[in-house]
Image: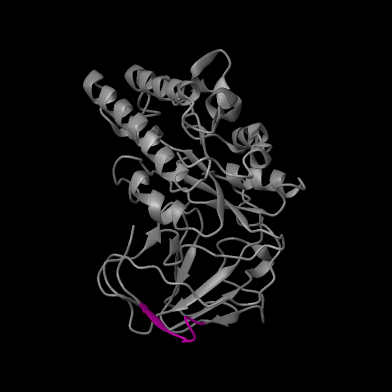
Amino acid sequence: MDGLLSVTALQMAAEATQTEIIGVSPSSFPIIHDPSRYSSPLSCSWPDLVLRRMQENPFTANIAVLNQAAGGNCILYDYHGPNALGRIDRDVLAQSGIKYTMIFEGVNDIGTAPATPAAQQLVGDRLIQAYQQIITRVHAFGLPVFAATLTPFGAPNDTIQPYADPLREQTRVRVNDWMMGSGGFDAVIDFASVVADPTNKTRLNPAYDSGDFLHPNVAGYMAMADAFPIELFERYASGVNGF
Amino acid sequence: MFGVNDLPITQAGIGLPLNGSAGTSEVIPGSMVPLTFSGNQSIIVPNGAQVVSDPIYYPLEAQSMVTVDLYTELGQQGFYITSHPGSRTTSWYSFGNYVGAPNMTDPSTQSEAHW
């Protein structure tokens, strides 16, 4: 039994006049292999790195980040933990003081669906529909929904990275194009471009690759955190229209 | 994942880990304070349910780590327990009540580090 048992969250009052919480909701990437983890009180996952930037900015200094990431999680079915569509109620909407939400997830749905045209068409259709469902449900509470594009997982072969396959790459690009082009999300942070190899967009930049062609390393997470537009918090301070 | 049986929490507390480290079994001596649940020291959490402890005054610096101690005298039946398997931190467990203890030193003490 790994990890955190029986405890789901710690709630705190902030010193500001208002308590604001961003739910960085289901995500498959804030995972790092940092050997200094146990000697350092600070984690180097990308939401923690964004939080550090937020702490230095007067407008965002009193916004807490609630990282609901679950490693290996999927949006459409229970894989490592419950599916993310089913987690929206408990892990996002049921949290107190939520002002902003974000989703960065879908890569495990694509990567575990068979690399066949029919299966990849279906998982792409269902992911896009699930994003729309999430947007509608979160908007109904007057909250903005941000998203991040799915980062590349191409590799020299599918032994070193089992997700690597041209058909899965097509689905990743299709989903990202929908995110960027549909206007459904209130903002889309293009993490895929941030960490992609400039000479081969189907792969992680070697400088940002943890070694498995899927998970970024600390430098990659730092690049993602630096690319996060923290002005979004001020822009969406009043929430969104619910419909 | 979630437990499928009652979780009887006998006693709980919150404190500060030694050196502010994540995943350590040691806490800063004197930092551990008791938690109550709607005024009671114990509570039985039904399967799938979530409970909250009562508010306490416990100032914390932003981005700091905390340690939560839980003691279940009767234990939880079955093989399913609410957990976050990919949490990238370490939990420690042992027979006996170690709520408020500076460290867990019983020979039965076990941990599960993720890497």
Q: Does the magenta-highlighted stretch encompass residue B37?
A: yes
Camera-nearest residue between A89 and A152: A89
Q: Residue at 54%, 44% (x, y): give it.
A: A33
Picture quadrant of residue B65: bottom right
Is residue B100 at least partly visible in the picture? no
Residue B5, how many percent across, how many down?
A: 27, 71
Residue A163 appears left or right of A179:
left
Q: Is residue A66 magenta?
A: no
Q: Which residues are magenta?
A: B36-44
Residue A85 appears anywhere in the view: yes
Q: x, y percentage for residue A75? A: 35, 40
* In front of the other: A77 or B77: A77
Whole-percent x, y for residue A182 in the image: 45, 23
Which quarter of the figure is the N terminus of chain A placed in?
bottom left
Residue at position x 40%, y 56% in the image: A90
Decide if residue A39 is on the left or right side of residue B7: right
Tell me: A129 left or right of B66. left
Q: How many marks?
A: 0
Q: Which quarter of the figure is the C terminus of chain A placed in?
A: top left
Task: Choose between A4 and A135: the one closer to the eye.
Answer: A135
Classify B23 as above or below B72.
Answer: above
Q: Position of residue A139 (x, y in %)?
A: 46, 42
